[in-house]
Each structure stands twice: as C-alpha cells, then as structure tokens.
Amino acid sequence: MIRVTSFTSQLKIFHTRNELLELDRAVNEFLESRGVRQLISVSDAVTTGSGGEAIGVIRVIAYEDPGNA
C-alpha cells in the first residue's frame, strides 16, 4: 500500500541550515522506524509570509508501507 506523510518546519532567519538538517533527521527517523525500503517521492514546498519571505517548509513523502507489501 502506498502512503503519503508530510512534515513541516518553521524557518527562522540565520537558522535555516540547522532547521533543514533537523527536518532531514525527522524524515529519516520516520522512515527507519517504520522499516520503509521503497521511497517513491519526496517533495518540498516553501511557505511565505505576507512580505514574500520564506517562513517555513513542507516536505511530503510517498512511500510503500512495508507492513502491506
């Protein structure tokens, strides 16, 4: 069975690199904890504030659920 999950991270000025590393870590831990072996898609979208500044990122992953393979 194919499943889709999303993760979000707020972006703060001068902290973006660390926040993206933390987002990567969270996604990797999620995949490892569920034994996911087949990652189908990864997509990132940036959210913006009223002034057009980047304020967050949404990462969506599609994967094959190993429990239903």
Image: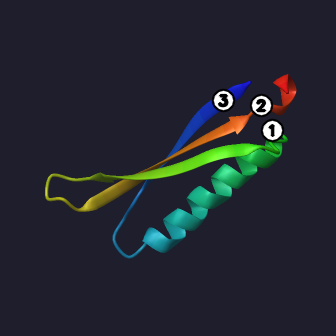
Where disc 3 sits, the SS reads: strand
Tell me which numbered mark, 1 or 2, is placed earlier along the sequence.
Answer: 1
Q: Is residue 8 above or below residue 16?
A: above
Residue type at tag 3:
Arg
Judged from the image, the secondary structure of the residue bearing numbered disc 1 is: loop
Q: Which residue is mark 3?
A: 3
* Spatial CA span between label 1 and label 2: 8 Å
Q: Residue furthest front?
A: 40
- Look at mark 2 in the image and give the residue it sits on: 65
Which of the 4 image quadrants contains residue 62?
A: top right
The kind of residue on which mark 2 rests is: Asp
Quadrant (top left/top right/bottom left/bottom right) for the N terminus: top right
Drawn side of residue 27 relative to residue 59, left or right: right
Query: Residue placed at 66% from the left, 59% from the top?
Result: 25
Q: Quadrant of residue 61?
A: top right
Pointers 3 and 2 in contact (C-beta within 8 Å): yes
**Residue 42 image point, x, y percent:** 58, 49
6 is higher (above) or lower (below) than 52: above
Asked if the residue under mark 2 is in contact with the one under mark 1, i.e. CB atoms within 8 Å, the reply is yes
Alpha carbon of mark 1 to alpha carbon of mark 3: how far? 12 Å
Quick one: label 3, few (<14), some, or many (20+) residues within 10 Å? few
Which residue is under mark 1? 34
Residue at coordinates 52% horizontally, 64% vertically from top-left? 20
Marks 3/2: CA–CA distance: 6 Å
Q: Is residue 26 left or right of residue 11?
A: right
Q: Say which amino acid is labelled 1.
A: Arg
Return the x and y of residue 67 as percentages of the image width and height.
Answer: 85, 26
* Rendered location of residue 47, percent (x, y): 32, 51
